[in-house]
Image: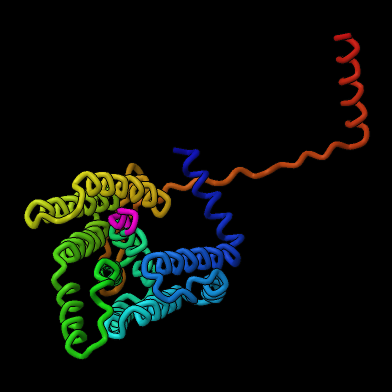
Amino acid sequence: MTELLLLRERLKDFYGRFDIYITPLLRFLLAMITYTVINRSIGYYEKLDSPVIVLGASLVNSFLPVNAIVLFAGIFTVLHLYKLSLICAGIVLILFVLLFLLYFHFAPKDGIAVLLTPLLCTIGLPYIIPLCFGLIGSVFSAIPIVCGVIVYYTIIYIKTNSTLLQDTDIEALSRELKSVIDGIMGNQTMRIMIIALGLSCIVVCLLHRLAIKYSWTIAVGVGGVIEIAVMLIGIIRYDLDISSGGVLFGGILSLVLAVVIQFFILSVDYTKTEFLQFEDDEYYYYVKAVPKMTVSLPEKRVKKISGTEKDDTEKEINRARRKTE
């Protein structure tokens, strides 16, 4: 445990000293991964797939807030879909604007959840997002997570039905419009995923604020169980095209990762809990104080060897060598 605490303190110290370089680098990597995934998933506009454009946009985003990456990602997506179908581009543009206004109003600081949720959905690990944002965010953090789920399944639907969304006559456009709206709104898998991730985030946020021992760990455990249970019920009840084994593996792995992240965010020593009482002119205050588990980094000591000490050391080394010879 002490070694883990030392590692945590070293990481915090390293980040504190090099924050000015680490934060832009992380934004750059997140932006580049996001734009690359978009280009690989719906690469209808070949010019946007240019490494120069991806690197240039990522470099610009490294100096801007995370919400700028969300905006750029939306622009990339709409431009790709414009090459496929004007109707698709228009519907997705309206959807993106509504989602952006919704999450920006309630949880503007959680824009990274909008990006990470669809990215992790592609590898089957979206379950980690509600557990983490439930710990560090608020109940409104569920909104950007839900927005990320909607974005992911919208792109999946359009990619799957791209051959049916390229007609240009008026009658076909009306059918296309109805098809896209029905396909997005009627996606049962998306609904179950929204319930699982949104409910998990809210439950984790509420539980970790309780004044009980190990509330953070309990919150993560309950949130993870809710995600797995809702997904499995949805698979059985609605015969969803999702692997039960994948849900179990992803949910358990997300639980483990969330516990590790929780340790680095907050670890407390409940054995040293104190109950304090004090008052002012109007109130009595009863406070429960639980100390954080911290360790001090060992100080580096540099021993200076004077000329005389250095000569004595060399003489001792030479004597030892002669004895061995």
- Quadrant of the image occupied by residue 114: bottom left
Quadrant location, the N terminus: top left
- Find out whether residue 19 is within the magenta segment: no
Residue at (27%, 72%) from the top-left corner?
Answer: 163
Depth order, front residue of 103/94: 94
What x and y, as percent, mark residue 45? Answer: 43, 76
Residue furthest to the bottom? 170
**Which residue corresponds to the image point at 17% horizontal and 62% vertical from the top-left?**
189
Q: Position of residue 155 (x, y in %)?
A: 30, 70
Q: Residue furthest left?
A: 237
Q: Does the magenta stretch mainly form a helix, a strand or a loop? A: loop
Indicate whether 83 appears above or below 32: below
- The quadrant the C terminus occupies is top right
Left or right: 295, with 134 as reference point: right
Q: Quadrant of residue 192?
A: bottom left
In the image, residue 239 lies at what x, y percent?
A: 10, 54
Looking at the rendering, the stretch of residues picked out in magenta corresponds to 122-128
Q: Quadrant of residue 169?
A: bottom left
